[in-house]
Amino acid sequence: ENYGYNVHDLGKDVDENIIVEKAIELNADIVGLSALMTTTMTEMPKVIEHLRRKKPDIKIIIGGAVVNEEYSKEIKADGYSEDAYNAVKLVEKLT
């Protein structure tokens, strides 16, 4: 929000359907997914696939302690950021 973006934090352990519905409702340009545990990161590809089916033009970025650039490419996210500051730079490149 400090950089002029509208941010909607849906919380933690959010069901993929809620993420997709909210992205559609808000006509979001970008969805950011974060994983702090390996059990969470395994859900990311499912969320990305669902988002791409329902809102093909959306950009998806990931971050968190257990993911990296390689994983981002593997699951077909549009980018990875190691922290919030670099996430802003990534969003600027994607929009």
Image: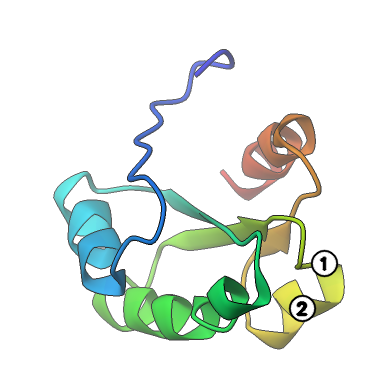
Q: Which residue occupies 64% across, 66% down?
A: 78
Name the quadrant containing residue 74: bottom right
Identified by mark 2, the residue type is Tyr
Mark 1 surroundings: few (<14), some (14-19) or many (≥20) residues within 10 A? some
Q: Position of residue 51 (x, y in %)?
A: 35, 73
Q: Is residue 61 left or right of residue 65?
A: left
Of 58 and 82, which appears nearest the observer? 82
Q: Secondary structure at mark 1?
A: loop
Identified by mark 1, the residue type is Asn
Name the quadrant containing residue 11: top left
* Quarter of the figure with the C terminus: top right
Q: Is residue 15 left or right of residue 63?
A: left
Q: Is residue 90 left or right of residue 95?
A: right
Q: Which residue occupies 50% across, 60% down?
A: 59
| Residue holding disc 2 | 71
Mark 2 surroundings: few (<14), some (14-19) or many (≥20) residues within 10 A? some
The type of colouring in the image is rainbow
Q: Position of residue 65 (x, y in %)?
A: 77, 57
Is 92 drawn above or below residue 80 in the view shown? above
Q: Which residue occupies 28% across, 68% down?
A: 15
Q: Does the CB distance between marks 2 and 1 fall below 8 Å?
A: yes
Q: What label does residue 68 carry, if any?
A: 1
Of 34 and 75, which appears nearest the observer? 34
Is 8 drawn above or below residue 52 in the view shown? above
Number of labels in the image equals 2
Q: Is residue 47 left or right of residue 87?
A: left
Q: Which residue occupies 77% across, 40% down?
A: 83
Q: What label does residue 12 carry, if any?
A: none
Q: Position of residue 14 (x, y in %)?
A: 33, 61
Q: Secondary structure at mark 2?
A: helix
Label 2 to label 1: alpha-carbon separation? 5 Å
